[in-house]
Amino acid sequence: MLIKRFPTKGYNLTNLQKVANEVGRMSRSELLNQRVIPINNKNTKRLTFVSKFSSASMQIEQVVKKCWPILQQDKVLKQHCMELPLFCYTRGQTLKDKLCPAELRTIKKQSSLFKGPPKKGTFPCLNCICCASIIKGDIVYHPISGKAIQLKSYATCESVNAIYLLKCPCGLVYIGQTSRAVKERIKEHKSNIRNFKAGSQSDTSISRHFSFAKHNVSQLKWQVLGVISRPQRGGNVSKLLLQEEAKWIKKLNSLHPEGLNEHWNISSFL
């Protein structure tokens, strides 16, 4: 039956008959035994480059191979990059995945303070002390290039699972994330600035900069960059927040010395 089906998929009929004859001479017990595939120990120390297969996979592989000698010249990385990596691929997105997703897309009604069409951006809740220091609007400007970036989420001081931006009078920015209401995290930042003491719990990159630059806590401005919705089928929201935080740190160049973020971690993507 299979010999009749496989040729329609492009398999060579001669090779199929050859394999069928070989399998036909094997006993049933031999066919049911699990084969142990020997592992080539020479390749065990090679790094594995895993990506999703697409039309650009071969180009990506060529770029990695071309730039690999750069990593081999690094003092720290050269011991791990002696050989080219093993290129492995996971299944890419197909037309079926796009047309028939496992998770249905639902349109959620936006709870907004405003009537009319749904708004995007950050807006005050009009009910807390953090409203006075908010950067209102649906655009965030790159602190170095000045490029305008459109925000895609609606957020207020009450928003949870959010990625936020802090801005000082110098123009430096800090990117953070919180699973609580944004206003609670902003209050903590302001408290650290007021009660700054070197080497204590209040010693953060934000409070330290405000202390050394002689800024006032009232000069701190903030804005929500995005809000993470909890997946319908469950998922690690904390991991999603860390991923979005890392993306925004890179997008806005907020890592020290260009910004106030002291760390940039991509382990959440692994």
Image (cartoon, rainbow, N blue to C red):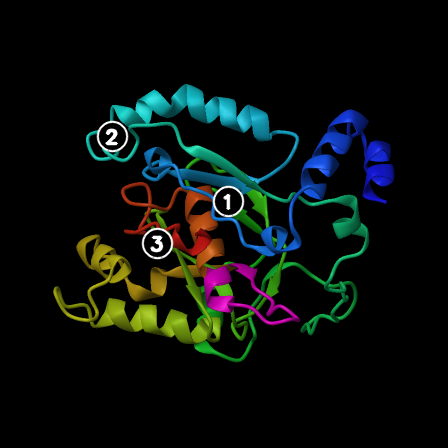
- Give how far apart the Cα atoms at labels 3 and 2 are: 40 Å
Q: Say what amino acid the circle numbered 3 marks.
A: Cys
**From which residue to which does the magenta span run?**
225-241
Left or right: where 139 falls relative to 261: right
Q: Which mark is residue 78?
A: 2
Which residue is rendered at x = 65% and y = 58% of the image?
Answer: 120
Q: Say what amino acid the circle numbered 1 marks.
A: Tyr
Give the secondary structure at mark 3: loop
Foreground tag (3 vs 2):
2
In magenta segment, residue 133 = no
Q: Which mark is residue 141?
A: 1
Neighbours of disc 2 within 10 Å: few (<14), some (14-19), many (20+): some
Labels 3 & 1 near each other (Cβ < 8 A)? no
x and y, in percent, of residue 229 in the image = 60, 67
Which residue is rendered at x = 85% and y = 40% of the image?
Answer: 5
Which residue is rendered at x = 28% and y = 45% of the image?
Answer: 256
- Give how far apart the Cα atoms at labels 3 and 1 are: 14 Å
Residue 209 or residue 41, whichever sits in front: 41
Q: Say what amino acid the circle numbered 2 marks.
A: Lys
Tell me the quarter of the picture where residue 205 sits. bottom left
Q: Which mark is residue 158?
A: none
Residue 108 or residue 136, whichever sits in front: 108
x and y, in percent, of residue 267 in the image = 38, 53
Neighbours of disc 3 within 10 Å: few (<14), some (14-19), many (20+): many
The quadrant of the image that shows the N terminus is top right
Q: Which mark is residue 168?
A: 3
